């Protein structure tokens, strides 16, 4: 039982005022959020929330604590937005918490809450040891007939300890009545099952098949969650396995709790035996074929993982085949063709989400798909392999992704764009394998010729060059937008979808955490600012005070990191002429261009990261590297009168990869991660802010502009141009044939932008809370 001074115990006792009737209670002392769990509602949700309009499919259980005991409550659906925008999150401190009684004497609903602005510094080493303030230690969801929780940010990954319980890798087969079985031999084949079912002459094929089928897993799909708000299925999961034996291939479907038990342990290449399963017509297929249905009951299927040597040689299934292509070969691959790739990971993008428009989720809305960008190099071409990696139901692997790992991606599809630009993206069967997970030494792809060629290149690759080009996180867009309005209009089918300022404001407020969207507006530039992160008080800027902004009925939004939407003009102490101040750099800084951060490898500390990464294909190894990146910071002084503009968010800046802080950096770019500056060297900390007045209704938008320079390590050099503001904004980069203008020169040229009507492309991403990132990627002038 909780201590007598337990805050949660006291407030729960106050819910009973000397009678059996329970009332709402309010706690004004600080409580902390230990856990946030998501699940889909079912048919009984209206019983728990009779007064709420249930428009969303999701419900959330919140674990609260006073650091002495803990209590699980359900979030009222009207507060779901707090979780969806990552305000109510693990570690958050709550100032005022109102709990309403649930339908049982020990259940409560969180109906009102005030979240502190600052991040709570809560360190509970093992909160599972905390006592419960009420009988809320139920393992599953509180308000739905579900057995498992969903991950917070997608419907593809698994979540919770139940998925980590691994069954015995090899089950002992029953002994024969006369003698012990020395080798496994199938009692039925794929051909037998297909012929027997399709011929309709063997009635037994339509009942449970209890004979032993021995097959090899060729592909494994991502998890498919089919939970619906109008269904009470307790474990609504299925997964597809393409398997084969020496007679043919067939689809195996794992249903419901069989996914929980067997999805993680099974991997492509494994040999398994199946018995006690059913044969069905292949689901949603035009061809007349079969599938094998594997369930935990009616009948209870049996699965066993077999070693290669335990199967009779003549019945041993064929090995999986791989189609590896190098970066040079991929440039000629047709659109939508499939491939496998291997490469050295040199850039890991931050996790973001986009809306899937072709499929509705359980609540009738569009599903949010989580993805990140990877850059792989294999030495066959100067053009790297770009992979748009969506979730593949491998959360443990995805969270460990960081530069300097050898990565293998299977079953990718090629996306060819205009101008010879291409990238790869995932399919339903994509699998990801990387250094440190123990897969490389076990998978048969290690014998492929393309893999051997890559490993030979890796052993002779310059490691100093690799570390200099290794980056992680930050704003990134690929393929880059067009460099002319004509091409952009053509790519948009002549319909760019211009938004009014008020419409843009409304769309921005609908963004969920790390959701990314592209917007297009017609606007005029009213202010240009240059500064460095952390030194915004020393910015230099130009503002057009002669411009007038019509009043708007839309209220101003709060200040945000990276972007701000307002319905009033920005107040500034500057005059209409540009402010020019001499930029003072260190003596070793370049004479022109923005201050640059340089990476200097420590010559005395020679690492063997690449050697160890390649060695994992032969044996399991662990990486141990203590290299530390250093940068040569440049400083400057400028106008002390700073205008009102949003500062760049830490999440918008690309970090130089530092092996000594790899866990900290990986957490910062993950969904729900904490931004960090400790021990971090940024690729560049210089940025420009453009204040744009939307021509349709005068709403003001402040957007960050990050021009690509010659030293950019992510994208190829830009096309030559005049390095005027018009050409820089059209290309999103400085010209590749000359040194970029200095910030002072660019601010001096800013008055040339006054009165110009421009088509502005904006990339918006919600970073959590009231923080929005708005990046100006292109601005095309309109003919007057």
Image: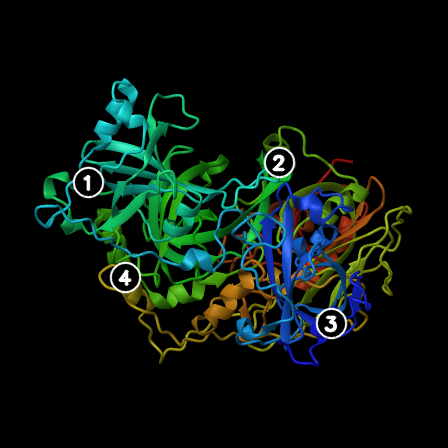
Crowd around label 4: few <14 · some 14–19 · many ≥20 (10 Å)? many
Q: Earlier in the sequence, mark 3 or mark 2?
A: 2
Secondary structure, mark 2, is helix
The nearer-to-camera label among 1 and 3 is: 1
- Residue tagged by mark 1? 317
The CA distance from mark 3 to mark 2 is 36 Å
Crowdedness near tag 1: few (<14), some (14–19) or many (≥20) residues, C-alpha within 10 Å: many
611 w.r.t. 587: above or below: above
Would you place residue 11 above or below residue 777 in this image? below
> Which residue was labeled with disc 3?
538
Task: Using the numbered discs, state the Cα–Cα distance from disc 2 to disc 1 in whole angstroms.
Answer: 51 Å
In the image: residue 23, left or right of residue 308: right
Q: In the image, is 328 to the left or to the right of 655?
A: left
Q: Residue tagged by mark 4?
A: 614
Q: Do we see residue 758 in this rendering?
A: no
Question: Contact (CB < 8 A) between labels 1 and 3?
Answer: no
First of labels 3, 4 by sequence position: 3
Residue 707 in picture, x, y percent from top left? 61, 55
Q: Quadrant of residue 603?
A: bottom left
- Going from N to C along the chain, the mark reached first, 4 or 1, is 1
CA gap, disc 4 to disc 1? Answer: 29 Å
Provide the secondary structure element on which disc 1 rests: loop
Please tell me which of labels 1 and 3 falls first in the chain.
1
- SS category of the residue bearing label 4: helix
Numbered disc 3: secondary structure:
helix
Seen at 61% across and 63% down, the residue is: 136
Q: Residue 675's x, y, as percent? A: 60, 66
Residue 447 visible to the viewer: yes
Most distant residue in the front direction:
19
Question: Where is residue 777 shown, x and y percent of the image?
Answer: 64, 48
The residue under the point 39% across, 51% down is 261
Q: Look at mark 2 in the image and give the residue it sits on.
A: 488
């Amino acid at each position: 039982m909780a201590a007598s001074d337990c805050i949660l115990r006291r407030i729960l006792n106050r819910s009973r005022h000397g009678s059996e009737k329970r009332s709402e209670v309010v706690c004004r002392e600080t409580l902390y959020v230990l856990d946030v769990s998501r699940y889909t509602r079912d048919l009984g949700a209206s019983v728990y929330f009779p007064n709420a309009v249930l428009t969303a499919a999701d419900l959330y259980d919140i674990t609260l604590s006073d650091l002495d005991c803990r209590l699980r409550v359900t979030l009222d659906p009207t507060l779901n937005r707090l979780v969806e925008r990552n305000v109510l999150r693990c570690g958050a401190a709550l100032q005022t918490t109102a709990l309403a009684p649930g339908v049982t004497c020990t259940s409560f609903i969180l109906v009102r809450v005030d979240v502190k602005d600052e991040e709570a510094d809560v360190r509970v080493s093992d909160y599972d040891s905390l006592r419960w303030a009420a009988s809320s230690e139920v393992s599953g969801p509180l308000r739905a007939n579900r057995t498992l929780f969903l991950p917070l940010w997608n419907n593809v990954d698994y979540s919770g300890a139940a998925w980590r319980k691994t069954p015995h890798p090899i089950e002992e087969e029953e002994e024969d009545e006369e003698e012990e079985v020395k080798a496994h031999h199938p009692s039925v084949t794929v051909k037998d099952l297909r012929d027997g079912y399709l011929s309709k002459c063997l009635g037994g094929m339509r009942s449970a098949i209890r004979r032993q089928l021995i097959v090899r897993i060729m592909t494994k799909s991502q998890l498919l969650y089919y939970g619906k708000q109008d269904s009470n299925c307790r474990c609504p999961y299925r997964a597809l396995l393409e398997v084969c034996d020496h007679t043919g291939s067939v689809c195996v479907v794992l249903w419901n709790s069989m996914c929980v038990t067997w999805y993680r342990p099974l991997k492509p290449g494994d040999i398994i035996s199946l018995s006690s399963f059913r044969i069905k017509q292949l689901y949603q297929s035009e061809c007349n074929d079969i599938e094998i249905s594997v369930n935990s009951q009616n009948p209870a299927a049996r699965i066993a993982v077999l070693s290669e040597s335990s199967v009779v040689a003549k019945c041993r299934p064929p090995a999986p085949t791989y189609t590896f292509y190098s970066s040079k070969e991929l440039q000629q691959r047709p659109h939508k063709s499939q491939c496998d790739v291997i490469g050295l990971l040199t850039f890991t993008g931050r996790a973001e989400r986009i809306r899937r428009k072709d499929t509705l989720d359980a609540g009738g809305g569009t599903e949010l798909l989580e993805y990140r960008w990877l850059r792989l190099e294999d030495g066959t071409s100067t053009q790297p392999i770009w992979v748009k990696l969506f979730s593949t139901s491998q959360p443990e692997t995805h969270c460990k992704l960081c530069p300097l790992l050898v990565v293998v991606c299977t079953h990718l599809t090629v996306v060819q764009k205009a101008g010879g630009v291409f990238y790869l993206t995932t399919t339903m069967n994509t699998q990801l394998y990387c250094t440190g997970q123990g897969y490389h030494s076990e998978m048969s792809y290690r014998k492929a010729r393309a893999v051997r060629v890559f490993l030979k290149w890796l052993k002779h690759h310059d490691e100093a060059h690799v570390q200099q080009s290794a980056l992680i996180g930050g704003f990134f867009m690929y393929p880059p937008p067009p460099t002319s309005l004509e091409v952009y209009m053509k790519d948009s089918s002549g319909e760019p979808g211009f938004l009014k300022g008020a419409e843009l404001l409304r769309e921005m407020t609908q963004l969920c955490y790390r959701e990314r969207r592209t917007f297009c507006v017609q606007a005029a530039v009213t202010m240009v600012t240059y500064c460095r992160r952390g030194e915004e008080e020393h910015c230099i800027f130009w503002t057009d005070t002669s411009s007038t902004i019509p009043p708007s009925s839309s209220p101003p939004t709060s200040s945000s990191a990276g972007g701000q939407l307002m319905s009033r003009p920005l107040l500034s102490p500057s005059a209409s002429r540009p402010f020019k101040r001499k930029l003072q750099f260190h003596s070793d800084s370049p004479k022109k261009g923005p201050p640059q951060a340089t990476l200097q490898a420590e010559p005395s500390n020679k690492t063997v990261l690449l050697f160890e990464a390649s060695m994992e294909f032969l044996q399991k190894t662990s990486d141990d590297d203590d290299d530390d990146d250093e940068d040569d910071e440049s400083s400057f002084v400028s106008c002390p009168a700073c205008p009102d503009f949003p500062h760049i968010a830490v999440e918008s800046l690309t970090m130089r990869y530092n092996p000594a802080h790899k866990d900290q950096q990986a957490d910062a770019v993950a969904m729900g991660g904490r931004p960090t500056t400790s021990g971090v060297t940024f690729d560049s900390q210089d940025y420009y802010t453009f204040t744009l007045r939307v021509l349709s209704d005068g709403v003001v938008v402040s957007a960050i502009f990050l021009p690509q320079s010659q030293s950019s390590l992510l994208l190829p050099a830009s096309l030559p141009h005049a390095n005027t503001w018009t050409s820089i904004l059209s290309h999103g980069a400085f010209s590749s044939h000359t040194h970029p203008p200095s910030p002072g020169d660019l601010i001096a040229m800013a008055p040339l932008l006054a009165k110009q009507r421009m088509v502005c492309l904006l990339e918006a991403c919600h970073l959590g809370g009231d923080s929005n990132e708005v990046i100006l990627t292109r601005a095309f002038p309109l003919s007057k």
